[in-house]
Amino acid sequence: MGYDYLSGGWHDITFTARPVADRSARNVALPLTGDVALDREHLLPVLGATMTATLLELVASQQISGSFKEFNLLRGDAASGWQWVLLVGVGRPAACREAYRWHDRVRSLGAMAARHFRRKNLLSFAVPSFAAFGVEAERAASLLAEGIHLGLYRFERYKSPHNVRYDEAHQLQEVVMLVDAPSAEVSRGFATGTMMAQATYLARNLVNTPAQDLTPSAPRRSPPSSQGCTPNPSAPRRCERRGCPCC
């Protein structure tokens, strides 16, 4: 059976939306900006007062940072209900005045969180809704699903089974978005992001396949029907290029 360029390297992930108090995912990935007021606003509902205060103290003492793409994995406390908390730097709000920059941050957070949790064999995690950053729930769900799938992409077509880094048992299984109220818009966003990622997987698989295994097929040309054509002896070369058999 030939290589499936659409699903090569693809692994299904369950995306769901649950209330903010839900802790079934056990692990959580949260954005960190370094802006105390904004960080407190979105950390407090997810982590509780004790752990939020501890994290903000670490930020103030510069032991952890909200710089873009910097991340820190910390043990959750009993009060928060989380096993592991991954803090992903998204940069200060002043650097993200345009909406597309926040969108890029959400997509990047999903990719980094997915790779890091998979590397630690933590196969489920939760993320916030990003409402505090002005990103609507449906858009955030789409960006997260796309970023998570793209972050996990690996082209391993030519590797033997024992050299494949992550087998099916060690692939990410579930991502939960913590929202005030689950809605059809969030589900639609997850579906859209997954579809976008599948299209990108196809493109990446085609690009990564060497030419000797992905040879272009000769175009199939069927001559057009001669019915209704009027012979034109004065322009045979032109008609020949058109492929018309009678002109």
Image (cartoon, rainbow, N blue to C red):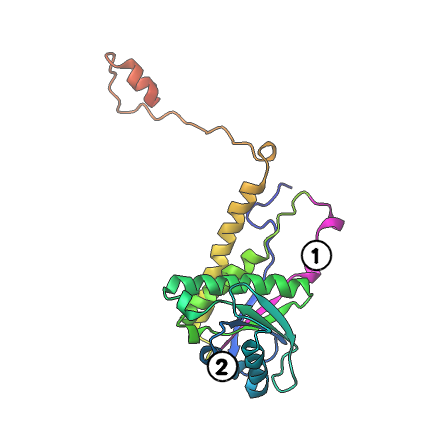
Kind of element beneath mark 1: loop
Sequence-wise, the earlier of marks 2 and 1 is 2
Q: What crowding class fits label 2: few (fewer than 14 Cα within 10 Å), some (14-19), or many (20 or more)?
A: some
Q: Position of residue 240 (x, y in %)?
A: 33, 18
Q: Residue furthest right?
A: 162
| Total numbered circles | 2
The residue shown at (65%, 45%) is 157
Q: Position of residue 29 (x, y in %)?
A: 57, 71
Image quarter (top left, top right, bottom left or bottom right) of the C terminus: top left
Q: Residue furthest front?
A: 61
Q: Quadrant of residue 150?
A: bottom right
The residue shown at (52%, 70%) is 66
Name which residue type carries label 1.
Asp
Front tag of 2 and 1: 2
Q: Which residue is mark 2?
A: 40
Image quarter (top left, top right, bottom left or bottom right) of the N terminus: top right
Which residues are drawn in magenta? 159-179
Is residue 22 at all visible to an observer of this figure? no
Taking the image as shown, residue 171 lies to the left or right of residue 243, namely right
Name which residue type carries label 2.
Arg
Q: Quadrant of residue 13?
A: bottom right
Q: Position of residue 241 (x, y in %)?
A: 34, 20
Is residue 110 at all visible to an observer of this figure? yes
Taking the image as shown, residue 28 lies to the left or right of residue 237, namely right
Q: Which residue is mark 1?
A: 167
